[in-house]
Amino acid sequence: MSQHFTHDVLIVGSGAAGLSLALRLDPHLRVAVLAKSALSEGSTRYAQGGISAVLDPGDSLEEHIRDTLEAGAGLCRPEAVRFAVERGPAQIRWLQSLGMQFTPREGHEDECHLTREGGHSHRRVAHATDATGRALEETLIHAVQARDNISVFENHIAVDLLTAAKLNRSPQRILGAYVLDRGSDRVQVFHARSVVLATGGANKVYLYTSNPDVSTGDGIAMAWRAGCRTANMEFIQFHPTCLYHPKAKSFLLSEALRGEGAKLLLPDGTPFMHRFDPRGELAPRDIVARAIDHEMKRLGADHLYLDISFKPAEFIKRHFPNIYERCLSFGFDMTREPLPIVPAAHYTCGGVNTDLRGRTDIEGLYAVGETACTGLHGANRLASNSLLECLVFGEAAAQDISQRWRQWPVAEQLPDWDESRVTDSDEQVVVSHNWDELRRFMWDYVGIVRTTKRLQRAKRRVDLLSHEIDEYYSNFRIGNDLIELRNLVQAADLIVRSALQRKESRGLHYTLDYPKTDDSQPPRETLLTPPNYVPPASQDDAPVGTSTDKKRDTIA
């Protein structure tokens, strides 16, 4: 028999989106937070740059909105951009009230030091030196651990969502989830009035990524299988500057380096970004990553360089202490020499389609953070808008759940996980081989620069892997690696299908077959609909992008 747990709200994911949402729920609600690994492990912890918010009197909300819309290449939902930007300053104040220490402005201890990153017209990125994500995560964890109504389950990975439709009940709504306890390798049943997906992106689908190992698209894949639509999955942001070193794995060199003047160089020391964009190193990430990719292929180079060594050593050590120490551990002194860099998959701009309250297509199911597509990022995310999104939409979803939770009774009877017809696998090599094959062909065929032929090759391979994994999943006992691989293949399929449908180049999607942006008609989102999709019962419950929403067009 499966072990059963009952809560009012089940939050799948323990990063900035999930934890900030948990803290803002009605304190009378019983809340469970699932952490796939340790509570502190996730993409939030590795965010170096900061949180974008209008805090400088010389800046304005309208300019932040304009910068975000410009970076999004015509595909941002304007209402989502304004919603997030207007609430940005309040998020910084809320974090400070929890005790988070931002780097102060010199001579003004009560003000945040603000840095500037690519695509921003002003300095508006509040940060904690070069380790903002770590400071944020630690602040949120400390606050969560002080709350009696929040239970944390570490080393627990969700397997699938339980919905009324899946159990042939009506009306359609979320009931809970099957969850694997990685310590015991037993599947447990979590009952909940509401479920929040806050599992991050799907960037481990690529061979080279700046993300930690847990970024396997779990929430996106589970929501799709449950009947939720996805939007804009073709837009994968490749961070231009990851440290090139065999042992560095996924170490990111913050965009704030370029914000403070660092230059991108060819192997012979020649700068090149001015040839691609008048903003140079401070152009949006899609432009910078494509320029680096172009120069690497033109020269046959394994990597290029990022140089800030012309700045005083004391300045570098004070502003980037963690990056400096980490690079030193790999044998690079950034105060004396340029650093070798390559682009790497960094951020999933698309995701589960939601409205401004985090609602999905299933009653009681929410998605927040990188898992969701709120419309804030459009075709390309503006630097440091990601943590902003986690906080703003986490708060909005928490408020909505706190107002509506009494509408959703707890399902008292949910079936145990059935393992009666499966056996232990004696071919674990199948999982590891398919994992490696998937990440390699996604990097080769669905990377920074794409073609229709490459995408079609990727689609054929995804279909074969999907069939193999479904067969394996049906016959053998599940484990963490199989769950993650199943989710990654589903995410890869959504990325490839979305990319094949977009017959233009826009933002992060660049194809040699359609190198121009199609300006002959209004920009359209790529909205994919699963075969088990059930339209929401009422317009009030419908996320942005339903057939009843006249303000948005979609690609069929």
Image (spheres, grey):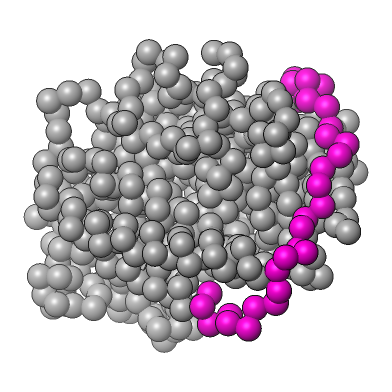
Residue at x 58%, y 82% (from the top left corner)? 427
| Viewer-proximal residue among 293 and 335 | 293
Image coordinates of residue 100 in percent, x first then y, are 67, 47
What is the span of residues highlighted in magenta in the rendered image?
402-431
Image coordinates of residue 344 in percent, x first then y, are 36, 64
| Viewer-proximal residue among 78 and 231 | 231
338 up-or-down from 116: above or below: below
From the viewer's perspective, is 67 left or right of 137?
left
Q: Is residue 126 magenta?
A: no
Image coordinates of residue 403 in percent, x first then y, are 75, 20
How many discs appear? 0
Residue at x 43%, y 65% (from the top left corner)? 465
256 up-or-down from 90: above or below: below
540 up-or-down from 372: above or below: above
From the viewer's perspective, is 102 left or right of 375?
right
Chief secondary structure of the magenta portion: loop
